[in-house]
Image: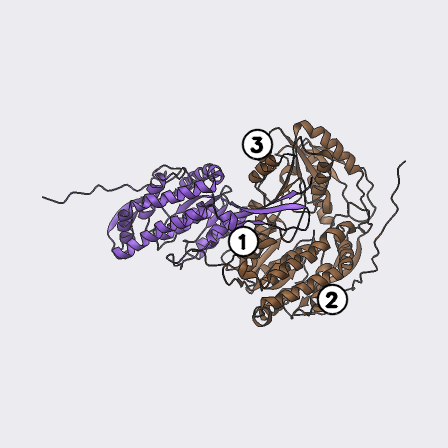
Amino acid sequence: MSERLTVRKTHKLFIGGAFPRSESGRTYEVHDATGSFLANMSQASRKDARNAVLAARKAVDGWSAATAYNRGQVLYRIAEIMDGRRDQFATEVAAAEGCSDAEANRQVDLAIDRWVWYAGWADKIAQVLGSANPVAGPFFDFSVPEPTGVVAAVAPQESSLLGLVSVVAPIIVSGNAVLVVPSHDRPIPAISLAEVLATSDVPDGVVNILTGDATEMMPWLAAHADVNALDLTGMEPGEGATTTEREAAGTIKRVMRPAPDIDWSADPGIARIRFFVETKTVWHPMGT
Amino acid sequence: MVFEYAPAPESRSIVSIAPEYGLFIDGGFTAPVDDQLFTTTNPATEEVLSRVSEAREHDVDRAVAAARRAFEQTWGPMPGAERAKYLYRIARLIQERSRELAVLETLDNGKPIKETRDVDLPLVAAHFFYHAGWADKLEHAGYGPSPRPLGVAGQIIPWNFPLLMLAWKVAPALACGNTVVLKAAETTPLTALAFAEICQQADLPPGVVNILTGAGDTGRMLVEHPGTDKIAFTGSTDVGRSIMRAVAGTDKRLTLELGGKGANVVFDDAPIDETVEGIVSGIFFNQGHVCCAGSRLLLQESVADEVVERLKERLSTLRLGDPLDKNTDIGAINSAEQLARIDELAKSGEEENAERWSSPCPLPDRGWWFPPTIFTGVTQAHRIAREEIFGPVLSVLTFRTPDEAVAKANNTPFGLSAGIWTEKGSRILWMAQRMRAGVVWANTFNRFDPTSPFGGYKESGFGREGGIQGLGAYLATEVAR
């Protein structure tokens, strides 16, 4: 008797909590580390990216207004749901990255633990990055970090899951919404992560995942007036990234530049959280 | 009976202005070269005050090289505690020469002596004093266990608060261990050059601070120079955009403090006398040459007519004229170019059928002046509600509900400042949380302090100046992973 034929999954985009195909009808082939065919991925178009900006903008008010306690629990929930699908993620990471099963398991564990680490930050960011300011006058003066808004991000190309989580989590933990382009050649764990997000109490539109070509989408997103910041961590340094940064000048976006050689297994600091918040300072007089 | 004010001019004998200035590079002034000189003018009289040097490419090269040497050989390796003492020295020297610098600033900028004396100069000294104390405490500031400086900072400052903007740039840069090449604004170079003398009096090692004068070209050379590790700019959003394009693809760090169109929101329960004073200081302080000015007044409909009437009465009593007179409230517009821009935008307000009212105060015959002006009947589509005027012109809009106030306040690409006037504390905090602006003043306006971080959201720029948050602009932060 022959082995059972597996039921393969159609990989689609993740926009506003739904899983649409690219409106363009385009797909691109993805292979494992040995060159065997894995899947046809949806290749997101500018119009898909625009839809993702709309979804993120719609989501960001509610998500940023949620209590920090609530956001922390939602991020922790992501870790819980991911943990139940460890084996699936490990298989996908091993196929994508061509690493040993042990290494793939380590990557998945680190990715899950990263959600736990960032979950705990949700209600501490304001205390660490905010301040009471002793001004020389009869005023109560305080500063609080607030989310920048809608962030368009490019996830690392090598680290298919841990790198992606390490980019997305610090953006959303403070209340931003994100649209992220995952690793071009290793996108499958990203779509499985989308399935986790869709079932983890993450409000629709807070995270949007666009598989495809970052150099096609990012310069255009950089010019989009409803995007507040760019995270180009996973973008190849060079002309595409420079063009993107130049386009971002039109609306004075915050731009985190490409960083190709990050060791994602090292302990994360809070530099990423800090980059995607704004400091608001409030002055209030004191008197009777 | 009405008492008249007698003239009360501050003496200008306390300042001595050289007929010509060179550039301050590597601890000394270069000899002025005739074909590089341009004039700086007193905007209240159009009198030429001095001729200063336009820094060219080789000057910028020399200044950046001097700053690099100082970073590598003296300032960078120096213990923080020693850097601190230099900064404390500078703070004290500024206090000692405070009156002189105030008069000099008023002469070169046109702003009232009342403001340079009571606002600019005290804040300049405070800024150095505050940051001096950080120099040997940076490991406690939350930027990792051993925060490092970035290197050579190229800094470009505007003409509206010349010495104060210098302090906002130079003090944190030096405290964090960077060296500086600063370009003063074209029309207000004199206090920056006086600051160069203060650096000499403080025995600051050569090259730690270099002061260049010049126009946009000099600034562009500094931005594009391969030897600068960091660019800090305060000025218009348009120039900010071009700077951001210029540093794209480099490793240079960038902070921008750009334009604004601040909303000043008045609810019907606000105490009217204080509110009128706050509106006045929000937009007519420093002739409205303030990036964080409350240039859009949002009045709750039920009190709109009353507030506008009271405002007109109050504006009619403001004294416009000789900036050196201690009773002057409104000084001169800084340049003919800026006056033309204010005029053009005010005319657009009339052409778009907003109703213009200007204070009937007489304008001096010489110099550049614009009377305090308010426009009523302004809608969100008017140019005077959308574009930064950077002058003594207030656009008045109305609202009915707090939600509408928030929507209108945030309906701008800028996000620098906002104001709220109400007696209700919970409403203040509710509004403050929703207004997308870097600084929110409740029942006050245009307050500044070195401990209080300042900077914008959205197209008003990024990065903060002042406070523990401001140090991040001059430190190499931990790797983002």
Q: Nearer the viewer, mark 1 or mark 2?
A: 1
Residue type pointed to by label 3: Asp
For residue B320, above or below residue B402: below
| Real-space Cα separation, disc 3 to disc 2, in angstroms | 60 Å
- Give the CA distance from mark 1 to mark 2: 34 Å
Residue linked to disc 3? B403
* Residue A164 spot, x, y in % from top left: 38, 50
According to the picture, the residue beneath numbered tag 2 turns out to be B34
Q: Is residue B87 above or below residue B374?
A: below
Tell me which numbered mark, 3 or 2, is placed earlier along the sequence.
Answer: 2
Chain shown in purple: A
Q: Is the C-beta separation of discs 1 and 2 under 8 Å? A: no
What is the drawing colour of chain B? Answer: brown
Q: Are marks 3 and 1 on the same chain?
A: yes
Give residue B245's mark.
1
Q: Residues within 10 Å of mark 1 (few under 14, many from 20)?
A: many
Q: Marks 3/1: CA distance?
A: 36 Å
Amino acid type of the residue tagged 2 in the rendering? Asp
Secondary structure beneath dot 3 equals helix
